[in-house]
Image (cartoon, coloured by chain):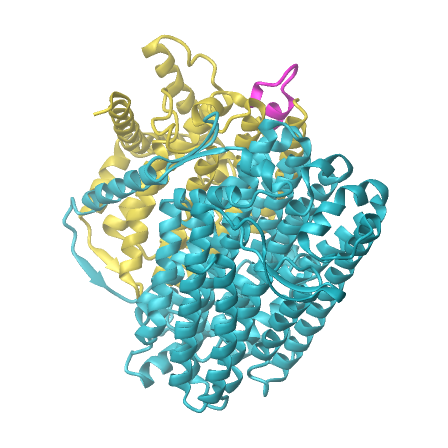
Chain colours: A cyan, B yellow
């Protein structure tokens, strides 16, 4: 039986082998697609079994070393603990639907071959497995980071004949290299200073060595250490799309890539930044160093940056009129929630009492659960956007309308995803936001700014809802647009995507609802994850037991201050729904279909439609200074002209 | 079966029943008083009951392209409001006290509005969509106000439990409860908007948008939306009374209970008087108004976090 570490290495190697194989058969789109899917599914099985073993029986005692050149500190050490396991689970859980979706989706690219798609897709996946599990902060961090960045670059410029895609890819490449340098310089500073203090350079870039040397370093050279941590925050902040770095590359890169890759970029890749942040700021620092580690300040910085990120990202998203660009801005917004959760966790851990430790754990659960949830619903939303693109040939929301009639299944899954991201109760996004609010509001006794952050987050949640009411409403509801009418006419109304594209959407939608109604699954998972990753400040988190989770009775905070029982709520709501249905049938009214009333206009024309561009004019005007113009490429004609 | 569960169910059914019974009556009072203020005779008090019954039997014209969504939104809108009724104290402790907390309440109140939005989008008329855009903008500005009021209570009591917070918790500060008093003012000034009455009925605006999101609705669906809107008035009033005016609820059973409903009625009368004597604001005016209220509420929130 393989150890979890061996399983990860085998998964990485099979991805690389699969990449070569798909390159060889890249002339046959479907064959290459199936091979890529089977390889992805195979690695997912490996990853799932490894991660679940770690979560149930605990991690291995030591990191496993695979390949070493000790002279320059070059050693591949892989370690799968609870935190890594959760992120690996997420990567595998999004990669499989994305790969399956690709098989049918990639067929519609007439003039681009898949030779530059599947190999890169698999390398990209392999790099994420590696980056999430290596303990080497220098060489292998660099190798896996580049292995993730370069295929990512190739995937973003997949449609290289469009100039804006190449520009987006270049920007992505530049930002990722800056992030890489920042993180490596930070690691170098910690490692070299640590090695000098300890007098030994063996394994000097290894996570455990750096962690062991850190208390001394924090005490003797606090400024250098703070500088290193600031570099980490910058590097991982760029990767995850934190304000102000995220706005530079993320909104251009995500829409440029093919939709399944957008799902991977937004669902998984930017989460490696979150992983890095959690790992370096919480797990790297031993408890004994807490006195010299300005955790409260870092927590405040991260929480405030998170609040700014979530507000700006979502407000800019509200202005967007291109489906995938809108979703990309929301990725920034949702990362803000994760940052807020992480920052709250750090700020409360610094207080160091049992009560605040419990709250810190709730905040951490909220952040980590939001990582999972965002992966699921944003992955789904990008697949939805891909289906819309596949059926209508455009990303422009102004040209869409009334598609629910033609694509009912895509519409229902998009509605589920929209509800999830807006935090509607009984969908997964609510639970993670709820945990973050609970921790931030109750923790405001120790850190007063947190309650203001929480209120801004609640306000932003309404903004998210507004944005998705627009996204869903103008594309699937509203009235059929001229474009959709033409498309539907050309295909005899068969606009719905093939089943191979429907299935991944259904699976992800099901997971969103499942985690929303039975959040105890997620909470148990995270509790196990914390218990399986005792190290640094993570130990404090693992020792606190903040929430009582039960599949049936839901979640309850230990002193029964905050409760959420989704099953009971769903039951009541369901009963009420039936009762209301009964009431509506009391009068046995007859039904008739008719055209809407247009105030006396004879016919409905496309110019009478109220489109995405028209929504929320006043708010867009008040927050015009915040940036995020809906038309990044002014050479394209603005919408109003097309309509008149 | 567990005894407390039975009580929960009984109390829940009671709450829902009360809301369903009282809501049209409040609407009747509202219409009658409005008429009297405007020197009209006004309809008889039970008229809203008859209206609803009549609507239930009338022809249901579906003008949207996705009738399934129209039906879903109509059923869900009243269902959500009734679910919220189980989370709100109606003279007694909230029945679903163990199923949710104030954060859930904030989000469920938003969901009530979402159903109307979906309904209007599914109908697809341009007027509906204009109304939706406005409705959503006011929701963005309003949701945080009530959220802050509840959070001020939660910060003071250190608890998110519904029965703890919805019991005058905003005033539980040492000394003068500044944050509670500020929030009382803020919510009083924005209360018309929560219950969607003049001067903040911008999304319906019957003189320009012809009921906005509900424009295309008729028959039973319109009855459901109207019923939900009437119930919202009762629920928000009950929320307001239990959060800001809890005095006297500790009296023995019939008196405390009657006092609670008397206070709700006073609030409904207040809403009516304001509505009857004011003209509608434009959306940009309303948004600016809510934004300044939000700034004031933030001050209250910070005060609360410092224990004032």
Q: Residue at x 68, y 26 (%)?
A: B306
Residue A205 vertical position relative to residue B92 in the rendered view, above or below = below
Q: How many marks?
A: 0
Looking at this view, is A171 or B192 the one in front?
A: A171
- A218 displayed left or right of A282: right
Give the image location of residue A480, x and y in percent.
Answer: 37, 72
Looking at this view, is A311 or A287 the one in front?
A: A287
Work out whether residue B171 can be spotted: yes
Q: Quadrant of residue B128?
A: bottom left
Looking at this view, is B75 or B106 the one in front?
A: B106
Residue A270 vertical position relative to residue A354 in the rendered view, above or below = below
Give the image location of residue A606, x and y in percent.
Answer: 43, 75
Residue A409 vertical position relative to residue A490 in the rendered view, above or below = above
**Residue stretch in magenta:** B170-182
Return the residue found at the far left: A588
Residue A591 vertical position relative to residue B294 in the rendered view, above or below = below
Return the residue found at the far top: B252
Q: Residue at x 18, y 44 (%)?
A: A582
Give the image location of residue A66, x and y in percent.
Answer: 59, 65
Is A25 included in the stretch rendered in magenta? no
Work out whether residue B148 can be spotted: no
Q: The N terminus of chain A appears in which quarter of the rendering?
A: bottom left
Q: Quadrant of residue A457?
A: top right
- A500 displayed left or right of B129: left
Give the image location of residue B97, x and y in percent.
Answer: 38, 27
- B155 displayed left or right of A582: right
């Amino acid at each position: 039986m393989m150890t979890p570490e061996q399983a990860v290495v085998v998964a990485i190697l099979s991805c690389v082998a699969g990449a070569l194989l798909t390159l060889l058969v890249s002339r046959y789109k479907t064959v290459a697609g199936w091979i890529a899917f089977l390889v992805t599914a195979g690695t997912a099985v490996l990853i799932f079994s490894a991660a679940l073993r770690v979560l149930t029986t605990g991690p291995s005692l030591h990191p496993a070393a695979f390949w070493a050149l000790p002279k320059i500190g070059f050693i591949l050490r892989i370690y799968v603990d609870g935190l890594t396991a959760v992120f690996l689970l997420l990567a595998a859980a999004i990669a499989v639907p994305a790969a399956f979706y690709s098989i049918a989706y990639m067929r519609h690219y007439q003039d681009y071959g898949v030779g530059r798609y599947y190999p890169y897709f698999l390398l990209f996946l392999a790099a994420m497995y590696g980056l999430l599990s290596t303990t080497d902060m220098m060489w292998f961090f660099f190798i896996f980071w580049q292995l993730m960045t370069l295929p990512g670059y190739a995937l973003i410029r997949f449609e290289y004949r469009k100039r804006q895609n190449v520009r987006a890819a270049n920007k992505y490449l530049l930002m990722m290299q800056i992030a890489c340098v920042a993180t490596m310089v930070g690691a170098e500073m910690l490692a070299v200073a640590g090695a000098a203090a300890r007098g030994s350079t063996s394994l000097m870039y290894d996570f455990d060595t750096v962690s062991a040397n850190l208390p001394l370093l924090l005490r003797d050279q606090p400024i250098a250490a703070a500088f290193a941590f600031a570099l980490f925050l910058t590097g991982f902040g760029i990767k995850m799309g934190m304000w102000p770095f995220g706005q530079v590359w993320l909104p251009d890169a995500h829409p440029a890539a093919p939709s399944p890759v957008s799902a991977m970029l937004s669902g998984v890749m930017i989460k490696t930044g979150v992983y890095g942040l959690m790992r370096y700021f919480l797990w790297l620092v031993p408890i004994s160093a807490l006195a010299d580690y300005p955790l409260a300040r870092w927590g405040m910085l991260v929480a405030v940056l998170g609040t700014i990120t979530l507000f700006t990202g979502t407000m800019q998203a509200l202005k967007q009129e291109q489906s995938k660009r809108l979703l990309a801005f929301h990725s920034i917004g949702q990362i803000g929630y994760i940052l807020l959760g992480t920052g709250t966790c750090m700020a409360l851990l610094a207080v160091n009492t049992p009560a605040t430790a419990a709250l810190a754990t709730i905040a951490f659960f909220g952040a980590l659960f939001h990582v999972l949830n965002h992966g699921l619903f944003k992955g789904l939303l990008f697949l939805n956007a891909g289906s819309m693109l596949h059926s209508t040939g455009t990303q422009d929301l102004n040209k869409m309308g009334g598609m629910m009639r033609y694509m009912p299944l895509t519409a229902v899954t998009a509605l589920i995803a929209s509800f999830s991201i807006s935090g509607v109760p009984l969908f997964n996004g609510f639970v993670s936001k709820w945990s973050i609010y609970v921790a931030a509001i109750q923790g405001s006794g120790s850190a007063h700014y947190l309650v203001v952050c929480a209120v801004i987050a609640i306000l932003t949640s309404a903004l998210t809802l507004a944005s998705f009411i627009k996204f869903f409403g103008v594309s699937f509801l509203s009235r059929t647009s001229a474009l959709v009418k033409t498309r539907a006419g050309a295909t005899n109304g068969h606009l719905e995507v093939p089943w191979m594209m429907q299935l991944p959407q259904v699976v992800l939608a099901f997971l969103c609802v499942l985690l929303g109604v039975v959040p105890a699954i997620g909470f148990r998972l995270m509790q196990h994850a914390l218990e399986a990753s005792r190290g640094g400040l993570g130990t404090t988190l693992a020792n606190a037991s903040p929430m009582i989770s039960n599949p049936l009775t839901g979640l309850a905070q230990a002193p029964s201050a905050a409760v959420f029982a989704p099953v009971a709520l769903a039951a009541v709501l369901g009963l009420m729904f039936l009762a209301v249905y009964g009431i509506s049938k009391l009068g046995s009214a007859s039904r008739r279909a008719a055209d809407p009333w247009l105030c006396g206009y004879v016919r409905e024309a496309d110019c009478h439609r109220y489109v995405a561009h028209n929504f929320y004019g006043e708010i867009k005007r008040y927050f015009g200074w915040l940036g995020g113009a809906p038309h990044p490429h002014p050479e394209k004609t603005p919408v109003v002209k097309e309509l008149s | 079966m567990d005894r407390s569960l039975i009580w929960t169910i009984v109390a829940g059914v009671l709450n829902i029943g009360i809301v369903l019974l009282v809501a049209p009556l409040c609407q009747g009072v509202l219409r009658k008083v409005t008429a009297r203020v405007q020197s009209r005779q006004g309809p008889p008090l039970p008229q809203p009951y008859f209206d609803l019954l009549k609507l239930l039997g009338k022809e249901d014209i579906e003008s949207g392209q996705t009738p399934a969504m129209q039906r879903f939104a109509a059923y869900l809108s009243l269902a959500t409001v009734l679910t919220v009724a189980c989370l709100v104290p109606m003279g007694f402790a909230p029945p679903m006290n163990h199923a949710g907390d104030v954060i859930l309440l904030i989000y469920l109140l938003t969901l009530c509005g979402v159903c109307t939005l979906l309904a209007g989008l599914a109908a697809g008329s341009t007027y509906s969509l204009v109304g939706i855009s406005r409705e959503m903008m006011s929701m963005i500005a309003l949701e945080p106000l009530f959220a802050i009021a509840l959070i001020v209570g939660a910060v003071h009591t250190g608890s998110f439990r519904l029965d703890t917070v919805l019991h005058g918790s905003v005033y539980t500060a040492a000394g003068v409860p500044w944050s509670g008093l500020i929030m009382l003012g803020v919510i009083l000034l924005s209360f018309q908007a929560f219950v969607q009455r003049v001067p903040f009925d911008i999304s319906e605006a019957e003189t320009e948008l012809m009921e906005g999101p509900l424009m295309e609705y008729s028959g039973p669906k319109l009855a459901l939306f109207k019923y939900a809107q009437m119930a919202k008035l009762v629920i928000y009033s009950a929320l307001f009374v239990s959060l800001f005016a809890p005095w006297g609820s500790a009296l023995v059973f019939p008196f405390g209970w009657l006092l609670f409903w008397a206070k709700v009625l006073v609030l409904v009368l207040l809403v009516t008087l304001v509505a009857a004597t004011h003209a509608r604001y434009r959306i940009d005016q309303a948004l600016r108004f809510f934004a300044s209220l939000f700034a004031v509420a933030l001050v209250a929130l910070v005060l609360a976090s410092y224990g004032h």
